[in-house]
Amino acid sequence: MTTAMMHRQRVFETISPLLDTRSVPIGELLDTPRRLAASVDSPIDVPGFDNSSMDGYAVAASTLRTAAQKQEQDPQGIHQTVYGPIPVRGRVAAGAMGAEAAAGTAVEIMTGAPLPAGTDTVIAIEATDPAEFAAPEITITLPTTESGPQPGAFVRSRGSDVGAGTTVLTSGLMLSPAHLGIAAACGITELQVRTLPRVLVVSTGDEITADAAAGIHDANSVTLGAGLRRLGVDTTIITVPDDPQALLDAVRAADCELVVSTGGISKGAHEVVKLAADLDPESMMVFEPIAMQPGGPQGCGRLAGSAWVALPGNPVSALISFEMFIRPVLLGLGVDEEPRETEYHRLRGGFDEAPPSSKLQVRRAVLAEEGLEFVGGSRSHLLHSYARSTHLVFIPPTDPAPDANDVHTGEGDKLKTWKIT
C-alpha cells in the first residue's frame, strides 16, 4: 500500500510546477506567510549613523574628564563623581542633524537623534541637575570608576544592527513579522517570494446540495477555503452534486490552476470524481488508498485540464489531508520539511486508546501537564474534536514500509506532534 510519504511526493510533483516567484511590495506581505525566493543583502548600515538611545545630553567624554569634579556618596554609600557645571549649547531632535558641538559644551539630544560632531557619549537626563531641558548649564553625576568617563555610553553606533552588505534574509525563509521589519529597516521595499496558484475548492455530493431533510451542511469548503486563503491563495469555492459531467463542466468554466476536491473518490456507487475521470479522455488521475488513518482514500493528477488533488469527503480526513499533503507544497517546503511546529510529548495513560495498526495514525489531542490526551477517537467525521484539539499526534505503523516512518517517528518514549495554530 502507498505510504503517506509516497503520496506527499506525488502531491508535491503535481502542485510544485504551478509555483513561481515574483517581486512583491512588503506592504502586500503583512497578512499572509510567504516563503522567500531569493536571499537579501542590506544596501545600507543600520543604524545609518551614531544616534542616542536616551533623552539627555550629548557630550564628549574628554569634556567630562577636563571639567571641574567633586566626589560624594549617594544614600547607599556608592561613590559618585559630579562633573561641571557644563554649559549647554543647542538641541538636536530625532530626524534632524545638529551643528557641531563646541569643545567643553553639552547638547540637548532626543532618543534616535544623530550624535552631533564633537560628541561621543550621551548622558541620560536623569543623571543631570537640573533633570530637565532648557537649562543654560548642567552638572552631571555618574558612578566613580578608575578609568573615568569613556565614549559610547547610550550610543547606538552606526551599523551596530546590520552592516552594509550583510545577508539579512536567506532564501527559503518563511517570512515572519521580524523578517519583514528588518527588510523595511534596511530600506528594502520589495521581496522575491514564491507565488501561489489560483485554487478552486470543490465540495462534491448530492448530500450537500440536497434539501434540509436529506442534506448535510458543507464544512469542507469552509475549512479548506480558510486554510488556503490564510496562506494567501486566491481561492474560489463551489459545490457540485454527484453528476460527473456537471463536475467537469464547472471546473472547465472556472479560472483556476489547481482543483482541490473533497469526496467522490472512495468505493461507493456515486464516486463523482472517479466517474468524471472515466469521462475525461485526457485524465491523468491516480486514485489509491494510502496507509494513513484518517485520510485513506486519495487522488492526484490532472483532470478537466487542471492539476487536481482529490481529498476524502469526511471533514477530519479532508483537513488532515490538507495539512499533510497540500499545505507543505504551498508553503514552498520540500517533501521532508515540516509544515507545522513540531514537538515531542508523552501520551497520557499509554497506548490503550491507540491500538496497534499497520497504518500511520494521525490523532487529535489536547496537551495537558500530564501529557497528551486524545480527543474524539480516530473517527473521521468528528470535526468538533479537531476544533478542540491543540496537537496532531503521529502514531507510527507497527510494521512500516521502508519509508513510511521517515518523518513520523517519535523521540524516545515521546510521540511526534504538530502544534495546531
Image: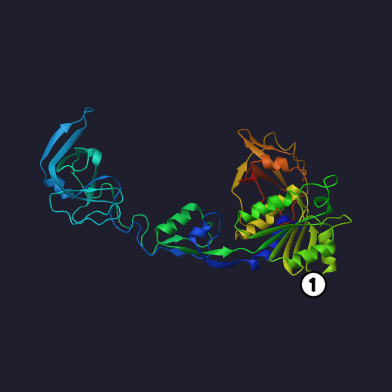
- Between 254 and 261, the one nearer to me in the picture: 254
- Between 13 and 394, the one nearer to me in the picture: 13
Rendering coords of residue 172 (x, y %): 54, 61
Q: Is residue 285 visible?
A: no
With respect to residue 81, does 164 lie above or below? below
Q: Examine the image and state in which quarter residue 8 appears.
A: bottom right
Q: Which residue is mark 1?
A: 282
Q: Is 68 placed left or right of 365 in the picture? A: left
Q: Residue furthest top?
A: 75
Q: Is 249 placed left or right of 20 in the picture? A: right
Rendering coords of residue 224 (x, y %): 69, 53
Identify the residue at image location x=67%, y=64%. Answer: 15
Identify the residue at image location x=63%, y=33%. Answer: 370
What crowding class fits label 1: few (fewer than 14 Cα within 10 Å), some (14-19), or many (20 or more)?
Answer: few
With respect to residue 374, does 25 lie above or below? below
Q: Amino acid at mark 1?
A: Glu
With respect to residue 279, does 112 lie above or below? above
